Image (cartoon, rainbow, N blue to C red):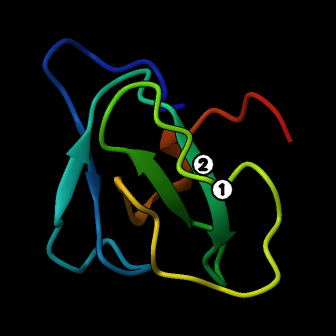
């Protein structure tokens, strides 16, 4: 989940593993995300986030092949220090 933030602050989501890329989304505090991969320098994580609260995005179990289809969910990259791991 996204770490605790100051009021009205959001975390930028980028289209690739670099914070120099123009953000293409943002997430608020306590938004649940699934971490799918880590950048080579371990500074950023690839995430899946639900568009609607309660959506599970079908990423809770391993899959045989990479996919870009997450149904009603979004994907992107964010700074690793902005994520608090709850399980796994």
Q: Is residue 6 above or below residue 71?
A: above
Quadrant (top left, top right, bottom left, bottom right) of the N terminus: top right
Q: Nearer the viewer, residue 19 or 64?
A: 64
Q: Tell whether 5 sits left or right of 56.
A: left
* Residues tagged 1 and 2 counted as in contact (Cβ below 8 A): yes
Using a 10 Å C-alpha cutoff, classify the residue at mark 2 as few (fewer than 14 neighbours), some (14 to 19) or many (20 or more).
some
Quadrant (top left, top right, bottom left, bottom right) of the C terminus: top right
| In the image: residue 52, left or right of residue 37 | left
Q: Specify the quadrant of the image occupied by residue 4.
A: top left
- Percent across and percent down for residue 76 are 38, 66
Which circle, 1 or 2, is nearer the viewer?
A: 1
Q: How many marks?
A: 2
Residue at left offset 66%, top offset 70%:
37
Q: Residue at x 74, y 28 (%)?
A: 86
Instruction: Examine the image and state in which quarter residue 20 appears.
Output: bottom left
Cα gap from disc 1 to disc 2, whole angstroms: 7 Å
Residue 33, compared with residue 17, is above or below; it is above
Query: Which mark, by number, is residue 59?
Result: 1
Crowding near the residue tagged with mark 1, few <14, some 14–19, many ≥20 C-alpha atoms within 10 Å:
few
**SS category of the residue bearing label 1:** loop
Give the SS element for disc 2.
strand
Residue 45 versus residue 66: which sits nearer the camera? 66
The picture places residue 46, in percent across and down from the top left corner, at 53, 67
The residue located at (49%, 56%) in the rendering is: 48
Q: Which residue in the protein does label 2 denote?
A: 34
Percent of width and height locating residue 57: 53, 50
Q: Residue at x 43, y 47 (%)?
A: 49
Name which of mark 1 and mark 2 comes first in the sequence: 2
When the figure is inspected, residue 9 is found, relative to residue 43, above or below; the finding is above
Label at residue 15? none
Give percent across and percent down for residue 82. Answer: 48, 41
Compared to residue 65, the image places residue 78 above or below, namely above
């Amino acid at each position: 989940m996204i770490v605790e933030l100051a009021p009205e602050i959001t975390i930028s989501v980028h289209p690739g593993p670099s914070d120099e890329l123009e953000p293409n989304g943002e997430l608020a505090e306590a938004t649940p995300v699934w971490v799918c991969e880590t950048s080579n320098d371990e500074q950023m994580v690839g995430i899946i986030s639900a568009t609607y609260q309660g959506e599970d995005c079908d990423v809770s179990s391993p899959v045989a092949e990479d996919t870009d289809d997450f149904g009603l969910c979004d994907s992107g990259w964010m700074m690793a220090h902005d994520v608090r791991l709850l399980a796994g």
